[in-house]
Image (cartoon, rainbow, N blue to C red):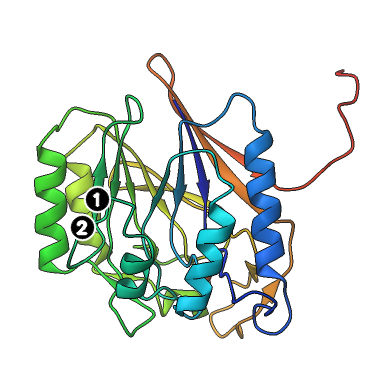
Amino acid sequence: MLIAHLSDPHLRPKGVLYQDLVDSNAMFEAALRHLDRLSPRPDVVLMSGDLVDEGSQQEYQLARELLGTLRLPLLMIPGNHDAREVMRRSFSDHTYLPASGPLHFVAAEFGPVRIVGLDITVPGTHHGDMDDAAVAWLEEAIARSPDRPTIIMLHQHPFDSGIPYIDKYKCRRGERLADVVSRYPAVVRVLCGHIHRHMQMKFGGTVLCTAPSTTTAIALRLDPDASPASYVEPPAMLLHHWTESRGMITHFVPIGSFRGPLPFA
Ligand SMILES: [Fe+2]
């Protein structure tokens, strides 16, 4: 099973630049073209939040237009820059999304790995929260098939990354998520967006990966009083490759056209 994972495109209305500086829409189109060239083709595409930048109707309209070219199934959760209700309305044909409340979902039909989308966003704020309702929903969702290989996807990172200005906006009470995960060894990955950088760590006994953005990268500044900044680093996506014998391998896939193929060795 091949699972492509894109994050944080921060789409703007047609013709508008992200932060007046970066053409996030064109960068997302490039990501979709790259995705379309992958061989073998992924079974499903995950989007871990911040599909758009301001949560406006016009932004979601453009998102729909661009995603209309995607010939693969897509599973999305919202990020802090999305607007939960506008997103729900704009993607009412995404029937895995519930009709009310947080945009949690369970998708079990794309292969051996079950995908659990966990919406820990707190509308109107930038941080996330593993509140009582999210803990209860997740427990119930995983317990339905406790031994099934499972990915849990959420937007905000549930740990301190060491980059101070993004940690202000992490998923609070992340230890509650780690506690649930630690009780289900079949959870093969916890996946996040939000940080706009690729990171890997051990979390609740499993592997947690954060996805790069298809747009800008948050500056890698580990000084406790570092000031916030972003860079237009090479955009990238993740590709999670599951086989029964090896388990899950996560590949980092830069987006673009690169010189090659050159002779090997
Ligand atoms: Fe973001």
From the Cβ of disc 1, is ligand 1 less than 8 Å away? no
Q: Position of residue 116 (x, y in %)?
A: 27, 46
Picture layout, residue 20 above or below residue 32? below
Residue drawn at (47%, 67%) of the image = 50
Q: Quadrant of residue 1?
A: top left
Picture layout, residue 172 above or below residue 48? below
Residue drawn at (14%, 33%) of the image = 146
In this image, 215 relative to 123: left or right? right
Identify residue for label 1.
105
Dot 1, crowdedness within 10 Å: few (<14), some or many (≥20)? many
Picture layout, residue 146 above or below residue 207? above
Identify residue for label 2.
98
Picture layout, residue 43 above or below residue 127? above
Q: Quadrant of residue 181?
A: top left
| SS class, disc 1 | strand
| SS class, disc 2 | loop
Which mark is first along the chain, 1 or 2? 2
Q: Position of residue 147 (x, y in %)?
A: 18, 27
In this image, 220 relative to 83: left or right? right
Q: Position of residue 255 (x, y in %)?
A: 71, 48
In this image, 162 relative to 121: left or right? right
Three-letter amino acid code of the residue under disc 1: Phe
- The label on residue 217 is none
The answer to whether residue 52 is seen in the rendering is: no
Three-letter amino acid code of the residue under disc 2: Pro
Quadrant containing the C terminus is top right
Work out which residue is located at the far top of the displayed protein and give it: 245
